[in-house]
Amino acid sequence: MNNYRHFIICALSTFLLFLSINLLKAQEHKMDRPSVHGMLLLGNSSLYGSHLPMFHSPHDYQVLLQLSISNKDKEAYIKDRFDHPNENVYTLEPEVFVLPEILENRKSFKGNIYRGHFERGGVEILKNVEVHIDKLLYFRKLNPLATKDKLPTYLLFGDQNEQFIAHSIKARPDFDELLSLQTRNTAVLDSLKKGKVVEIQLPELDLKKTYLKKQSGILLNGEKLNLYHSKQIYIEFDDLK
């Protein structure tokens, strides 16, 4: 009987501790004020949004989302990309909302799509688009005092047709960088098929030229990573000083 009582007390204590931690996290998120959380828009076969972060509230989150829009809006978006092949940057200007709500019950929002950066002279091509959050791929609150990795860490995401890589932002000062690329690594492609993000460290990253060299010698699960045809889409230093 004593052992049973001890078990019940321990289980209850663990549950209350778990509940308290989650309530504190929820309260922390509720302290964020509603804002416009601009995103870089990526992809053709599938759409992805990468939140444009800063090191101050309420923008201090690195977030990767898989998104969808109506067929009509997607056709217009793809056509605009096709008509402007030299434009790498497309951005999404969402309605005002609290970003951590996507961890709980927010599954959609309205927004405007721009060719170029929506705050830096971009051209609005679609207005008041209904954007659905199909999958939350990555969500992390930034800590300006965190310790940086010895080697740059990147987040590889996408699908079987298109792959992208985002610099993992750690401590101030840092930078936000996204590139498109291709990989033939079966472990990576299997993970992407399951909607996962693959974290990799890339020792041959050339920060002066800010592009990704062909990574022919890096192994992942015993198989060469082999990243090909990397193309920088976006690079930002000033917002993360």
Image (spheres, grey):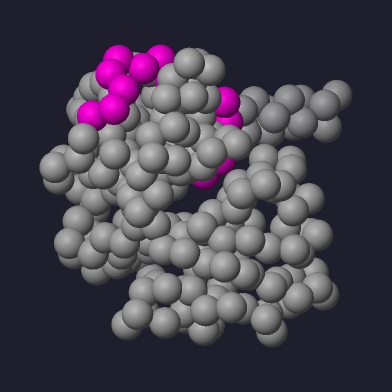
In percent of width and height, residue 69 lies at 48, 21
Q: Is residue 239 above or below residue 173?
A: above
Q: Residue at 32%, 82% (x, y): give it.
A: 208
Quarter of the image holding residue 209? bottom left
Whole-percent x, y for residue 10 in the image: 68, 33
Give whichever of 231, 158 is nearer the camera.
231
Query: Residue 163 location, x and y as percent?
Result: 60, 53
Whether residue 21 is visible to the viewer of this picture, yes or no, is no
Residue 108 placement (x, y as % from top left): 44, 17
Q: Can the viewer see residue 177? A: yes
Q: In the visual, does 70 lie left or right of 193?
A: left
Q: Say if 132 sits above or below 235 in the image.
A: above
Q: Where, by quadrant of the figure, is residue 183 drawn? A: bottom right
* Quarter occupied by the N terminus: top right
Q: Residue furthest front?
A: 83
Magenta span contains residue 104:
no
Residue that protrudes farthest toward the right in the picture: 1
Q: Residue at x 42, y 82 (%)?
A: 206
Q: How many marks?
A: 0
For the C terminus, which image quadrant? bottom left
* 158 lies left or right of 188: left
Residue 127 is inside the magenta segment:
yes
The span shown in magenta is: 124-138
Residue 158 appears left or right of 193: left
